[in-house]
Amino acid sequence: MNTRPRAALELDDIQRGVLSPRPTPYAATYILFRIDDRTHGRELMRRVRAVVTSAADTTSPLGDAWVSVALTFRGLKALGVPPHALETFAWEFRQGMAARAAALGDVGDSSPERWEAPLGTPDVHVVLTALAPDHARLQAAIDRARPAYQCLPGVSAIWRQDCHALPTETEPFGYRDGISHPAVEGSGITGSNPLETPLKAGEFVLGYPDELGGIQTPQPEILGRNGTYAAFRKLHQRVAVFRRYLKDNATGPEDEELLAAKIMGRWRSGAPLALSPTRDDPRLGADPHRNNAFLYEHHDPAGFTTPGGCHIRRGNPRDAAVAGEPRLHRMIRRGTAYGPPLPEGMLEDDGADRGLMFAFIGAHLGRQFEFVQSQWMNDGVFFGAGNARDPVIGSGDGPDEFTIPRRPLRRRLRALPRFVVTRGGEYCFMPGLNALSWLGDLHD
Ligand code: HEM
């Protein structure tokens, strides 16, 4: 048997944060920087190069802790990347997330005018993220990275967001997150669904053939190759509103859990409806070998078990018959909770800010992240449900509906309020390690 990877990914040039599954539990932090002086910005790139580990380096002295770096389009400009190179980057990236608000459904409470400063402003240039299994090791990783940005007066840290993943990996609404991940050909990292054929590396890393046979590489080659795009979004979750809505619309506690499962496509334990249709199965939910091993089309084409409009079937319809080709719209997700959990059973808002630092990684911002957000989450046409939006993150500015297919009569949830509000976000480019050196060595 030929066990050689079909796409020889240059793992030693790809940032570890792109492909490596993260430890559980973990603590993480985002630090944003503004570059006022390009020579200092370039020095930052040189220094950061020394602390960012590669996907091949799994023996870092910090163990399961690593630092990643990404730049916004304005960040590349601030470093003095020449215009002919800037023009070769993806159109959506050049626009920036705030400019794409209408397409992404960031309207009303989620509109960029209401975002948390400095998100979405021209000030955000560099995004540094550090991640570790616990706070002590996170601090060690930050301490290791600190010399990279200290004593550079032309570079200012302008925002910081701490986040965490609990041992149960539950996000603020109480569902286990971080379950479903695509397999990437040649990465050596297996996906979570044994029934899914690995995706071409070019779907996630720039410079390699993708599912359509094309190769996207921003130029010059040394800048684009082994990099990728990242989108992060700070998504505030209205947990009390979510809990109250379920309670008010359920016939009792068991029905409440069933509604929660129908909305997500998984019970809160992570057990998928597809494998456990009528009751929760926490052991299944916690078992990484089984909790994502399913498809839809053969067993559940009409969504009687997993509604076509639930969050996970929208996010990844797998083999279901929908308009479009699901393999072209996959993504690596790195969601991390922030803020204190709302105490169990509490149905009133306590005023604390909590939610998800959602992170997308992929080589195609447009046909992956933007497509899923605008066509699959904020519309229902692709599976024949008109303009119905995602019940969890749907960004309508008014009340929405959710249909649960059922025999003899379907069940309808009406007047779904908005549960998730965008607080801000950015489109970024995560360069390969050689590209970081190239950026550091730029001259005017
Ligand atoms: C606060 C906002 C969000 C919450 C609470 C949330 C929650 C979840 C949960 C609990 C899962 C199931 C666990 C898993 O498969 O890992 C999931 C899966 C997923 N979510 Fe979200 N999510 C949010 C935002 C988003 C956004 C903004 C997108 C994309 C635009 C997205 C796309 C996906 C995808 C693609 C999956 C995997 C589906 C699959 O492969 O079965 N989510 N989400």
Image (cartoon, grey):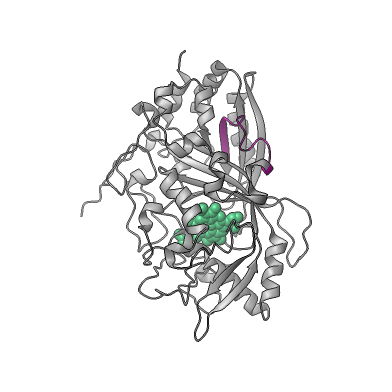
Res 125 quadrant in image: top right
Q: Is residue 377 above or below residue 263?
A: above
The span picked out in magenta is 114-130
Extreme bottom residue here?
A: 408
The x and y percentages for residue 354 are 69, 52
Asked if residue 121 lies in the magenta stretch, the reply is: yes
Extreme top residue here?
A: 444
Res 182 quadrant in image: bottom left
Magenta stretch: helix, strand or loop mostly: loop
Q: Is residue 432 visible?
A: yes
The x and y percentages for residue 254 are 64, 79
Q: Is residue 248 left or right of residue 440?
A: right
The x and y percentages for residue 334 are 52, 49
Return the residue nearer the eye: 81 or 169: 81
Q: How many numbered badges does the structure rendering display?
A: 0
Q: Is residue 59 visible?
A: no
Asked if residue 353 lies in the magenta stretch, the reply is: no
Rendered residue at 52%/66% (across/down): 310
